[in-house]
Image (tube, rainbow, N blue to C red):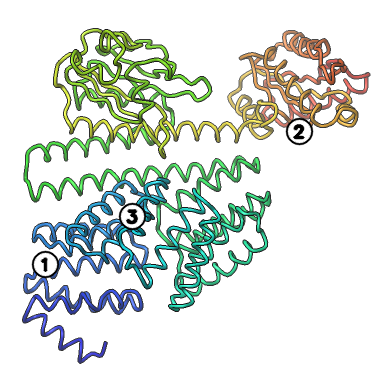
Amino acid sequence: MENNELQYNLRKFEEDENHIEYFISIFPEYIKSNPEKAKEILDLVMEIALNKEYELAYGWCLMYIGWYCFTISDYTNACKYRLDANEIFIKNNCVKGLIFSYNGLLADYTRLGNLELAIESGLSGIDLAEKENDEKALIHLMINTAIAYMDYRKYDEAKRLLNKINEVYRQIQGSELIVYYITLAEVEVISGDINKGYECCEVAIELIKELGCWIYECEILSIRAEANSKLGKNKEAEIDFEVAIKSAKSFKNIIYIVKTLRRWAKHYNRIGELDKAEKKLIEAFNEVNSLNSLLDKSEICYELNELYAQLKRYEEAYKFLKEHLEIEKEIFNNKSSSWLARLHNKEITREAKIYRELYQEIDLLSGIGKKFTSDLKIERNLEVIYEEVKELMEADVFGIASYSKEEKILKYDLFIVNGKRKNCGISALEEENFGTWCYKNKENIVINDMENEYRKYVPSRNKGIEDDNCNVKNIKSAIFCPIVVENEVLGILTVQSYKKNSYNKNTVKKLEILASYIAIALENAKLFKNIEYSATHDWLTDVYNRKEILKRGQTIIQNNKGCSVMIMDIDHFKSINDNYGHATGDYVLKTISDLMKKDIKGNGYIGRYGGEEFLIVVNSSNKEYVSVLANNIRKNIENYNFIVDSKKINVTVSIGVYNYLKDDKYFNKHIKLADEALYLAKLFGRNRVVNY
């Protein structure tokens, strides 16, 4: 825009607020092509709007400032500006602005990882666009909402929206038609018919060539590469991935550089080239740091955690899992803040007491959530949850049950009646009770008159909750809420009251938010426990790994505690591997570990020191006791029936022992002297214990 033209239109805007329409018409193209120039013009327009008190025009400026922030990956401020704009549009009943702001918030919330609010914003915009018969905005919102559904892994809902576009709005054309086919291709390749997805890719590619919209090339080639990978066309996949990355870099499309690198990593994982998968994921991780997208960074960290676990590089797996969990906490706390912002908007228009109260309670819930999602010890979390819940609602009875996939049962980890813990037992899923109904249907149960309402959920029972597995009498009101992560039910949460009509919609909403926090806490604890265990234990023998057993031994020495060290070696282990195969060698190692655990029990630590060697730290420096223990281990292994191909094989071990002396300060010395004793045990004919 020439300076004279800009000055002329700024003067016109000073004279008439409606001239904002001119700037609305030029801002989209400017933000796409020259965002910094767009920001300069926006600042000038905003200054006039503020000075002249043009509220609606100021709302539009906020919308485009939000768009500018989005283009530079500042998603938090993008969301803030567009929420402020949305508030102004609500106040001024500007439907066009509301549709526009909901579409913007849909994008902002998606990048911030708040997919529930992203989808809710999209659906709000769709509803308004349908009422206004704004077909162009409607198609745009439906496509973007379908993308949010895909990020949320709700592929059926995404397909439903895309099919509706195809059935009802046949006038879709131009770049929107390209985006439609790209989105349809992606949802089919991920969760539907890969061949159909491939066909959609081909249609989109032809449209890109025809219309010259090369900015979309990287997206569609990335999706086609994934389709080729899944169809076993590895050479074609490699070519598509390379061109997609080159195209994305030429347009500085960081989002699709990251997406393509992640897909490329999955391709290498699929064909077993894990080292190459690692390189691509590390590239994606480095790129995503400039993107400020919590959702993408969280997912990449989790993918790196899974990859390193596959590679048995548990320290690195542990590191990325911890980072993933930290980001998930940040995402969830952002969700709490978004709740507060939405309630704040409602207060402006309604100024109702109930919203002010709920605002305060949601703020409290956010604080509760921060308390127990930051603690990975789930047992402590459960107590925290109960203490806080009883301050928020009627909770004569409170329970949290988790689901065991292996046993197919619901087990109450915490059940409190009148302030006292109670052993509530378990429920098999085939049983008919409130807990199993809530779990199987993934829906809340809300009862305010038990006597008259319980049959909706347990029709064959003669009584209400008294016949449930926890046998609590005189309950009049109850809520059962599923605890869900990524569409998987992890368990249920229940509060119950001896009074009728104890619960309303706001109570349910508070409990749903708590259930979300609990879901994160449960999942975090489970993931953390698995990776933490893998980082300290040998995967085959289920005893400590070398690093951890050395660490524990050194800690005992530093604390001046008496101990003894054994080094045990399996006699002629190479012959076992050579004669019977490595699977038999693994079987021997695992069995010997199990036998040692029975002997050591809680009186020491066992670690795999390397190959067929084990290091045992015994919590005693009594020479006679430790010698007897070592010989028991040796005899139990010698006498055990190791069966291979229906035949018994002979397995023996040699053990060297060193007992702690008070002036010993270094654990490595203990190991060295125990190893010398082991050498003598082998020299004297093996299958024996030698004390240093």
Q: Nearer the viewer, residue 592 or 469?
A: 469
Residue 66 location (% of width, % of height): 26, 64
Q: Residue at x 34, y 29 (%)?
A: 482
State the image coordinates of residue 442 (x, y, percent, origin top left). Answer: 35, 31
Q: Which one is in front, 420 or 295?
A: 295
Image spot of residue 595 (x, y percent):
72, 15
Establish if 115 lies above or below 53: above
Work out whether 637 lies above or below 267. Answer: above
The quadrant in which the N terminus is found is bottom left
Q: CA distance from mark 3 to mark 1?
A: 33 Å
Foreground label between 3 and 1? 3
What residue type is disc 3 on? Lys
Residue at the spot of label 3: 164
Residue 325, percent across and down?
44, 42
Residue 327 shows in this picture: no
Dividing the picture into quarters, in which one does residue 130 lie?
bottom left
Give the residue at x 13% y 47%. Answer: 346
Q: Which residue is mark 2?
A: 610
Dot 3: within a 10 Å radius of its alpha carbon, few (fewer than 14), some, or many (20 or more) residues?
few
Q: Which mark is residue 6?
A: none
Which residue is identified by label 1?
A: 56
Comparing 651 with 411, the one in front is 411
Mark 2 residue type = Gly
CA separation in Å, label 2 and label 1: 72 Å
